[in-house]
Image (cartoon, rainbow, N blue to C red):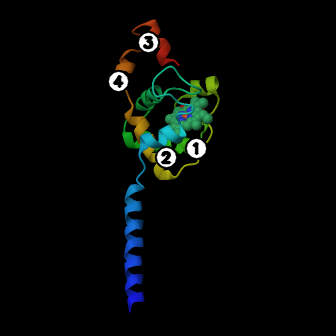
Amino acid sequence: MKKVLYFCILTAVVSGLALSEGIAQTPDGEEVFNKNCSVCHSVNPPPKSAPPVVRLANLYHLKFSTKEEGVANMAAFLKKPDHNKAAAVQAISRYGLMPAIPLSDEELNAVAEWVWDQYDPAMRRGRGAGGGMRQQINQ
Ligand code: HEC
């Protein structure tokens, strides 16, 4: 009888753990970025070996009118980078095509949402405002 009780307690504990893990599994986009992307991408200029995130966010906001569309297209690009689908076409000739990032769909979605949210309208307004700013935007 005691054994059965222990078994029940064990089952309850294990399923409790599985449940809390399930909740914790909703990935944090910024964390995914820091672990998997920041080696090549800075958030703001100057760039590392790829365009800065703020610039990418601005490009995606120009190309797609809704967050849903922008995030879906970005996540698809991260999974399988493709010249024909790139928003940052000029960046490919400057830096080369980005390698595919082997993450789960949830992680790719979370990081794409985070990148989309880094959009900075001030930077867009700066376009053409002065040589220095223009140079930053073109990086
Ligand atoms: C090994 C370096 C490297 C890593 C790691 C990397 N990137 Fe990139 N990424 C690049 C380069 C280079 C480009 C520019 C050329 C291109 O668009 O393929 C780029 C382009 C992009 C673009 C623009 C795509 C388009 O539509 O043109 C996005 C968005 C992006 N990266 C997001 C990410 C995110 C998010 C991660 C992490 C999950 C990541 N990158 C990891 C190098 C990298």
The residue sitting at 42% across, 11% down in the picture is 128
Whether residue 90 is situated above or below residue 115 in the rendered picture: above
Q: Earlier in the sequence, mark 3 or mark 2?
A: 2
Crowd class of label 4 (few under 14; some 14 to 19; many from 20; radius 10 Å): few
Asked whether disc 1 touches disc 3, contact meaning CB atoms under 8 Å apart, the reply is no
- At mark 2, the secondary structure is helix
Marker disc for residue 75: none
Asked if the residue at label 2 sits under 8 Å from ligand 1, the reply is yes
Asked whether disc 2 touches disc 1, contact meaning CB atoms under 8 Å apart, the reply is yes
**Front: mark 4 or 1:** 1
Residue type highlighted by circle 1: Ile
Residue type highlighted by circle 2: Leu
Q: Which residue is mark 1?
A: 101
The residue sitting at 46% across, 9% down in the picture is 132
Mark 4 to mark 3: distance in Å? 13 Å
Indicate the position of residue 31 as horizontal and vertical percent values.
45, 42
Marker disc for residue 133: 3
Indicate the position of residue 28 as horizontal and vertical percent values.
41, 46
Is there any visible trace of residue 72 in the rendered image? yes
- At mark 4, the secondary structure is helix
Q: Earlier in the sequence, mark 2 or mark 1?
A: 1
Q: Is 108 situated left or right of 80 in this image?
A: left
Q: Earlier in the sequence, mark 1 or mark 3?
A: 1
Q: Which residue is mark 2?
A: 108
Asked whether disc 4 touches disc 1, contact meaning CB atoms under 8 Å apart, the reply is no
